[in-house]
Image: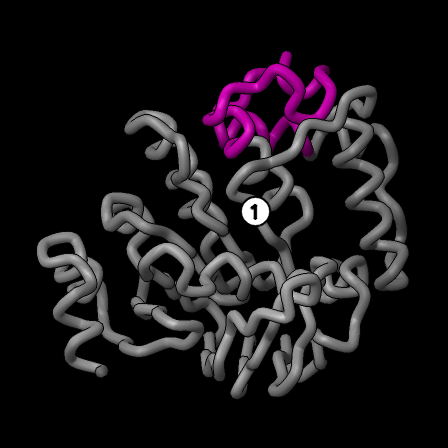
Amino acid sequence: MLEINNLHVKLEEEDKVILRGVDLKIGAGEVHAIMGPNGSGKSTLSYVLSGRDGYEVTEGSATLDAQELLEMEPEERAAAGLFLAFQYPVEIPGVGNMTFLRTALNAQKKARGEAEVSAGDFLKLVREKAKTLKIDAEMLKRPVNVGFSGGEKKRNEILQMAILEPRMCILDETDSGLDVDAMKLVSDGVNALRSAGRSFLVITHYQRLLDHIRPDVVHIMAGGRIVKTGGPELALEVETNGYADILDEVG
């Protein structure tokens, strides 16, 4: 599914190296989590994979289903099946949520050579997905994320994921700013989308999110690279002891 080899990245404006040889392989249907101290490169990894401007790849590769992601434009990566849920979803005044969702879905279908979804079929689809995710119908009538609470914004991102049906989902600290109830709702939405053909990379600071989204593999990132990999128990170790012991162990 997703394979990253020896990825080195620097921030263009500051000429600052952030990623220093990231290696990561996520198989079909797997859920991986990345934890690590602030400034370790976790969010940068998600930005680079999605094609955000301002970063220069100086070495390495990243492929999705054997397609080289780093050679694609952001919209091509999305059409190839990559999805990024942001830590802080932006508001888009003047653009209705329903219009945004249908336009995004049909743009991807067009890029793949598939037939576009009619207005009637889309309405049926979005109502079905919104009901599953416990999203109020009023949210669908509002501009994208405008006036939404933190939890509503994150659930709206999960709705986008449910509509677009990506193969590789990256969640960049999606638990940031959520209370316990909102985190449970978002986690339930993610778990409802898990399947043998869809993989997840969950970036988080907190083990409590992983109580709900149970990962197959947990990675610890520090200094721009992955320094330790293990099972869910690794997240519990971090929750109990912090990162100091792990960082001492790897030098």
For the image, the number of numbered tags is 1
Residue 136 in magenta stretch: yes
Q: Is residue 49 visible?
A: no
Q: Residue at x 16, y 80 (%)?
A: 249
Residue 213, horizontal then vertical, whole percent: 33, 50
Residue 82 is situated, as x and y percent measured from the top left of the image, at 65, 61
Span colored in magenta: 126-155
> In the rendered view, would you say 62 is above or below 140?
below
Q: Position of residue 74 (x, y in %)?
A: 76, 60
Position of residue 195 measured from the top left corner of the image (x, y, whole percent): 47, 59
Residue at x-position 71% and y-position 75%? 70
Q: Which residue is mark 1?
A: 85
Q: Give the residue drawn at x 69%, y 34%.
A: 125
**Residue for point 71% across, 29% down:** 124
State the residue in front, 173 or 75.
173
Query: Is residue 214 rendered magenta in the image?
Result: no
Identify the amino acid type marked 1.
Ala
